[in-house]
Amino acid sequence: MSAAFIRIVGLKKHFQMGGTTVRALDGLDLEIVQNSFTVVMGPSGSGKSTLLYLLGGLDRPSAGQIDVAGQRLDQMDENQLAIFRRKSVGFIFQSFNLIQSMNALENVTFPMQFAGVAPKERNSRATELLKRVGLADRMHHKPNELSGGQQQRVAIARALVNNPIMILADEPTGNLDSGSGISVMQMLAELHKNGRTVLVVTHDPRMKHFATHKIHLLDGKVVSEDEYERASLDALKFTEQAANLGEAHE
């Protein structure tokens, strides 16, 4: 059996909020294979986004081991993490994170400046990627002149410019209408088919139909799909009971 592309052992991430310790991840063990499309599902507070930021080198663990393509992120210093992010990871966020003063082409070329790519190559590569995501006629429009779906397509193009080994997406359909959300899912699935390792954290149940692998998180730990479904059903019942109690007191 080949080694896991991502291997996590005993991963913990704790935050202090006043006098309370929040255990966002609490002893997580996980393996993800290369060239997979993995969807991580869980309710708010389950540790989904925390996991994504740790895998992308945007945050540091409280304890545990994070190995990505043979690189130990938990042992890297800040400079090494910056190089890892620049060369190895393409990020896609729910809020798009586009620079409002730049047009689509400028937003996509921007990360390449830090990778030492020559201006002519930056422009050529960004233009080709924007064409691939269907924005050939919108390259010179700024974010406020684009729909939510178009902005997310710009973000996907930007995530690909440095040819990363993996794509990390945090609720990529969260701010989109149904049609735009499906379009973004299809683009992520296409990236996977073309050999990328894609990891998506989401609340969107439609996303799991595009995945090759599914991970369910509860309280900072991996659980089975059955456990996850039971917990989701219990949460729904509690919400309904609370609503009924509120109506009874009106």
Image: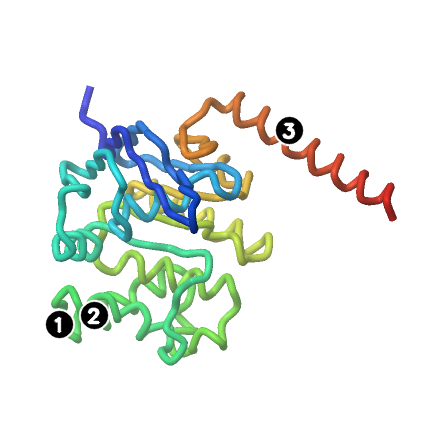
Q: CA distance from mark 1 to mark 2?
A: 6 Å
Q: Is residue 39 above or below residue 120?
A: above
Q: CA distance from mark 2 to mark 3?
A: 49 Å
The one nearer the camera, 24 or 130, is 24
| Earlier sequence position, callout 1 versus callout 3 | 1
Q: Residue furthest top?
A: 1
Look at the numbered discs 1 and 3 and tell me whether their residues touch, using CB distance below 8 Å: no
**Residue at 76% from the left image edge and 35% from the top image edge:** 241
Residue 154 coordinates in the image, percent (x, y) = 39, 64
- Which one is in front in this view, the residue at disc 1 or the one at disc 3? 3
Dot 1 falls on a residue whose secondary structure is loop
Identify the image quadrant of residue 126. Answer: bottom left
* Mark 2 nearby-residue class (10 Å; few <14, some 14–19, many ≥20): many
**Residue at 39% from the left image edge and 49% from the top image edge:** 169
Kind of residue indicated by mark 3: Leu
Look at the numbered discs 1 and 2 and tell me whether their residues touch, using CB distance below 8 Å: yes
Residue that mark 3 sits on: 233
Q: CA distance from mark 1 to mark 3?
A: 54 Å
Dot 3 falls on a residue whose secondary structure is helix
| Earlier sequence position, callout 2 versus callout 3 | 2
Dot 2 falls on a residue whose secondary structure is helix
Q: Is residue 241 above or below residue 1?
A: below
Kind of residue indicated by mark 1: Ala
Left or right relative to 13: residue 201: right
User: Which dot marks residue 122?
Assistant: 2
Look at the numbered discs 2 and 3 and tell me whether their residues touch, using CB distance below 8 Å: no
Residue 107 coordinates in the image, percent (x, y) = 33, 71
User: Which dot marks residue 118?
Assistant: 1
Left or right relative to 181: residue 75: left
